[in-house]
Structure formats: C-alpha cells, structure tokens
Amino acid sequence: MIRFVHIAALISMLSCAVQSKPEGGPKDEMPPEIITQQPVAGELNYTEGEAWVTFDEYIQGNSLRGNIISSPPLENIEFEVRGKKLTLNWNAKQHIKETTYRISLGDQIGDLNENNKVQNLEFVWSTGSSIDSMQINGHINLKGEGALDDLTIWLLPTRSDSIHNPIFSAAPNRDGNFKLKYLPIDTFDILVFQDLNFDKIWDNNNEDFGFLKRVSTEVDSQLVEVNYSTEKFVIPDLDTLALDSLHLYLDTASETRLGLVSYIIPPSASNVKMFAINGSIELIDLSVKAGQDTTITAYQKCLPGKYDVFGYVDDNNNGKWDGPSWELNFYGERLISGQSFEVKANWELDQPIKLDNSTENEE
C-alpha cells in the first residue's frame, strides 16, 4: 500500500513540473521588453566587437539574416538568438576612431509565442568621446487605405548613389509618427514604402511609396511631414454604345429635365482631366485648362442624379496620370477623389472641385 502511495505522489510531482501555455484569457499583444543591453544607447568609447540584449521573455528572430543594417557598414555581422537573449558579433578591427555607429534591426525580433514585434530595435554607440546627437521627428500623412505601422522608413544621405543602402531603417507607430535619433549634421532623403515581399528591399514598380528629399539636420528635432499615398488613377474603359446613347438623350432631352453644373476649378490646376459617374455609366469626360490667376468655371448639362467625381491634374499634358518618381523627385500628379454631388432637374449647381495638395510638386 505504501508503495502505491509513493508512486502516486511521484506522478503528482511530475505533472506539477510540466509547464504549458495557459489556456484562455486575453491574447498576448505586448512585445518583449528590454531588461539589459550592451552597449547602452549612446554609449561612448565603446570598441568591443559584440552587442547583446536580453528581454523579459523568450524571443525569436527568424528573419534577421539579411535584415541587419549597420552604419558605417560593418562586415560579417554574426548573430545568435538563444532563449531571451540576442547576441551580435563582428570584427572590431573594422572600427573607425571617433565615429558614431548604428546597427538597426527594425522589427525582426518578436516574442516566441505570438511574435509580437519589438519596434525599431537598435544599438548606437561611439568609438570616441562624443556621439552624433541630431534628431528628426516625423509624421506620415496617409492618403488612401492601409496601416501606418506596417510601413518601412529608410534614411539615406542625399549624396548617396544607391537607394538600396540606407543608413537607418525604422517603422512608424500606429499614428504615423517616428523618430530618427543619433544623426550627424547632414542632409538626408526619407523614403517610406510598404514592404510587400518582406525582404527589406524596395520594389519601386510594385510597392507603394512616398518620400521627402533634402531634409537637413542643422536644425535639431525638427518636425517633417512625409506624404504617402496608396491611391492611383486609372481611366476606366468606356462603353461607347452607352455613351453614344446617353449623348443622344442629352441632345434631345427637355431642358426642364436637365440640370446645369458649374465646376469651379482652382487656378493652381494647369490642366484638369475630370470624369464623373452616375451609376455605372460614364457621363462626363471633361478637360479644362485653368488660368494662372483666376478661377476657371466649366459648365456641363447633366441628367438628374447623384454623381461621383474623380480625375487628375495633367501637368505634362500627356493624357495619362503620372505617379510618383523617386529619380525625378516628382510626387505624382494631383488627384481629384472622394467628391460627389447631386443634380436636380432644372437646377443650377455650383460645384467646387478640390485637389489633393499633398502631392503638389516643387517648382
């Protein structure tokens, strides 16, 4: 009998020693917190070839390989993730005297269970007795749909020949705010893009982006605004038969059935191409050349109904919408979107047309 009691007690003790993930309760959405770190942020006279950080919980870093950015470049950085600790190693003989170094890991570290990301993890130190201390505070203005904290921010020296070698990589918070710290006095370009391939490489043909060039850090902690848009303009395929029938109807309709719309276009728009849709039929295809100093009004007779207006400012008069271009320092032609109006029979309507000024280009 005593033997059976001992066996039962042993089984009970073993079952108590087995740890498992608690069931139920709210989902863990908190990223790991840093407990200790070497070097500490902004440490001076640091010449070791190692950096490490420990967290308050077990971590993972499955995508670290190829996503570690160092500035100035440090060759052959090796890493190890073990338990709650991340360790980086490199050859310290590469160090330049009296230089500020930064290793950016972005959001590549997360907790083991839910992979909640540690945002903007980095090591910053100086091999000398002083450290770069300038800072840029920024905000991303989103035009269109998307989550701001899914974006990637790159900082590049304006004089850089390659856009694929940023000196700094970060992510904004959910409100689109970000901070770039420990910067030298210099002039930089800021690139914001959505990394759809999760490869930390900007694909400018397929990934939405925004940018701001020639940002100087001579003024410390300045606030900059970076415009980022997911909106594009595509001229829809026109149903010629429906349009011909509609134009014929407009020509023969009673004047009391039609409404007169006056489109009021600001003088800053040099060449507006505008379309309006009533239901599924294209009703208006209008090109208006605005003056330099005065507001231009264009008139259009329309059938009663609700209309959605969209269009763009054709700056180069090539008959198509041109999106942003990093190489040309061009933010994209301004859009007309999100506007609607209602036409009533035998009524006159003054309809102001609002342009998206967030993409207005520099002269």
Image (cartoon, rainbow, N blue to C red):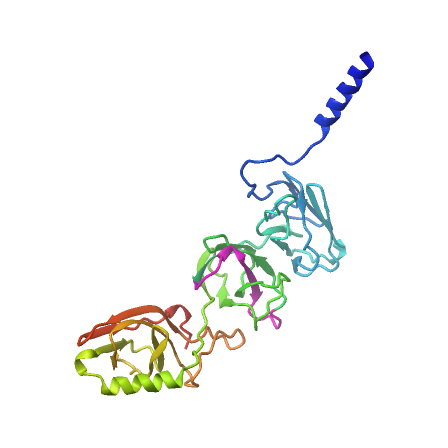
The residue located at (62%, 34%) in the rendering is 22
Q: Position of residue 209 (x, y in %)?
A: 52, 67
- In the displayed structure, 324 sits above or below 247; it is above
Residue 165 in view (yes/no): yes
- Nearer the observer, 76 or 3: 3
Q: Which residues are magenta?
A: 143-163
- In the displayed structure, 45 sits above or below 301; it is above
Using residue 202 as the reference point, say whether residue 141 is left or right of it: left
The residue located at (23%, 87%) in the rendering is 252
- Nearer the observer, 4 or 210: 4
Quarter of the image with the C terminus is bottom left
Q: Is residue 276 magenta?
A: no
- Nearer the observer, 162 or 45: 162
For the image, the number of numbered tags is 0
Q: Is residue 153 magenta?
A: yes
The residue lying furthest to the right in this view is 3
Quadrant of the image occupied by residue 58:
top right
The residue lying furthest to the top in this view is 2
- In the displayed structure, 321 sits above or below 190; it is below
Using residue 90 as the reference point, say whether residue 303 is left or right of it: left
Q: Position of residue 60 (x, y in %)?
A: 67, 47
